[in-house]
């Protein structure tokens, strides 16, 4: 599943992915800075157990589809019958990764005997990018759209557009 073995490795991956995505966003929008933007973010990756398969069976596990964690399995039991709804990510509007949240819009069903259900896995974070040159708000918005596309190409899916707030 390509899960990071430690929090430090996960943070380094996030930092690398963000820097690459912002570089791609700047290039895609033909914005050339003499000094690359400075990024500040706080990310605390959760320690998770990824379930075998693509269905929620065990409480407090996570379902990954195509390498992206989509669902958290929650319930009162330890083991239960499979729960449907965590089987197809192609129709979900999902998010995972920097500057966004991860979640799924499709509803899940719950086995009456199990009390285990799939809920959207949401991972949100705030990233502050500081440029050495002034940029207009519409330029930041264009960069944000390009960054989101670059991150989505790396299996980081979004349920909303990246929001730009000028400081």
Image: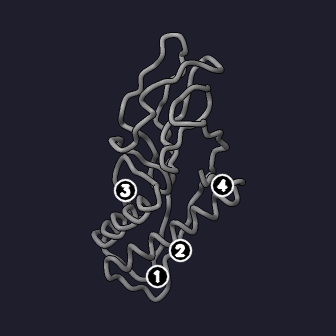
Q: Where is residue 55 in the image (x, y as percent from the top left)?
A: 51, 31
User: Which type of secondary structure does the marked residue at label 4 adopt?
Assistant: loop
Looking at the figure, which quarter contains the C terminus? bottom left
User: Which type of secondary structure does the marked residue at label 2 adopt?
Assistant: strand
Residue 163 vertical placement versus 129 (above, below): above
Q: Name the residue under label 4.
A: 4
**Mark drawn on residue 163:** 3
Q: Are marks 4 and 2 in contact (CB under 8 Å)?
A: no
Horizontally, is 136 left or right of 52 in the view?
Answer: left
Q: Do the residues labelled 3 and 4 touch (CB within 8 Å)?
A: no
Q: Which of marks 1 and 4 is in front?
A: 4
Q: Name the residue under label 1.
A: 132
Residue 38 vertical placement versus 55 (above, below): below
**Which comes sooner in the sequence, label 3 or label 4?**
4
Q: Position of residue 78 (x, y in %)?
A: 65, 20
Q: Do the residues labelled 3 and 1 touch (CB within 8 Å)?
A: no
Q: Distance between the residues labelled 2 and 1?
A: 8 Å
Q: Residues within 10 Å of mark 3 (few under 14, many from 20)?
A: few
Q: Mark 2 points at which residue?
A: 38
Q: Position of residue 87 (x, y in %)?
A: 44, 35
């Amino acid at each position: 599943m390509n899960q990071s073995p430690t929090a430090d490795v996960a943070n380094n991956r996030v930092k690398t992915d963000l820097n690459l995505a912002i570089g791609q966003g700047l290039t895609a929008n033909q914005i050339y800075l003499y000094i690359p933007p400075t990024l500040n973010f706080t990310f605390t990756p959760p320690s998770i157990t990824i379930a075998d398969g693509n269905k929620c069976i065990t409480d407090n596990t996570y379902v990954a589809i195509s390498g992206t964690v989509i669902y958290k399995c929650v319930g009162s039991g330890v083991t239960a019958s499979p729960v449907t709804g965590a089987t197809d990510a192609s129709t979900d509007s999902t998010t995972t990764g920097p500057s966004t949240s991860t979640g799924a819009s499709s509803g899940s069903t719950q086995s009456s005997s199990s009390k285990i259900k799939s809920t959207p896995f949401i991972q949100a974070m705030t990233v502050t990018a500081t440029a050495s040159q002034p940029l207009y708000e519409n330029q930041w918005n264009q960069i944000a759209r390009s960054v989101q596309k670059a991150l989505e190409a790396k299996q980081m899916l979004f349920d909303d557009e990246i929001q730009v707030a000028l400081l």
